[in-house]
Amino acid sequence: MSHTHSRRVIQAEGAAAPIGPYSQAIGFGPFVFASGSAGMDPSSGELVPGGIEAETRQTMQNLRGILEAAGASLDQVVKTTVFMADLTEFPRMNAVYAEFFGGAPPARSTVQVAALPKGARVEIEAIAALPD
């Protein structure tokens, strides 16, 4: 059985650079696997001020930029995982998250974690299917 799929590293200029030894996303076959993104300002590399809503909005903008660099969009996202520092902020994160997905949002898991890099309140990773 031969494997014809190649692994592609995705690097988006319009999204915050990775803060460790990982790629923003990897394309493999018909899928894009986006690493967890947080609310980092792409120009400064620092967390945006304004709390969970501002961080969620910037996180989703970063994720959108990464997906677009891979040839996909938020419309092709099939699964996300949301990591939160405090689940009591879930309703406010959820309201902003919903602004980025239409009537058929992707499957999603949301978990609370002990801490996130740089003191972030939220981090979101995604899997998208590339358009045919």
Image (cartoon, rainbow, N blue to C red):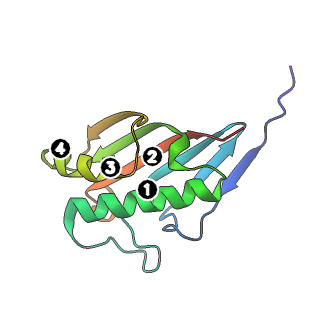
Mark sitting earlier along the chain (1/3): 1
Label 4: how many residues lie within 10 Å, few (<14), some (14-19) or many (20+)?
A: some
Task: Report if residue 131 is visible in the image.
Answer: yes
- Mark 1, secondary structure of its residue: strand
- Disc 3 designates what residue? 97
Q: Position of residue 128 (x, y in %)?
A: 56, 40
Label 1: how many residues lie within 10 Å, few (<14), some (14-19) or many (20+)?
A: many
Query: Gap in Å between the C-alphas at discs 2 and 1?
Result: 6 Å
What amino acid does circle 1 point to?
Ser
- Disc 4 designates what residue? 87
Query: Gap in Å between the C-alphas at discs 4 and 3?
Result: 14 Å
Q: Which mark is residue 84?
A: none
Q: Residue at x 63, y 48 (%)?
A: 26
What amino acid does circle 2 point to?
Glu
Query: Gap in Å between the C-alphas at discs 2 and 3?
Result: 13 Å
Q: Position of residue 98 (x, y in %)?
A: 32, 46
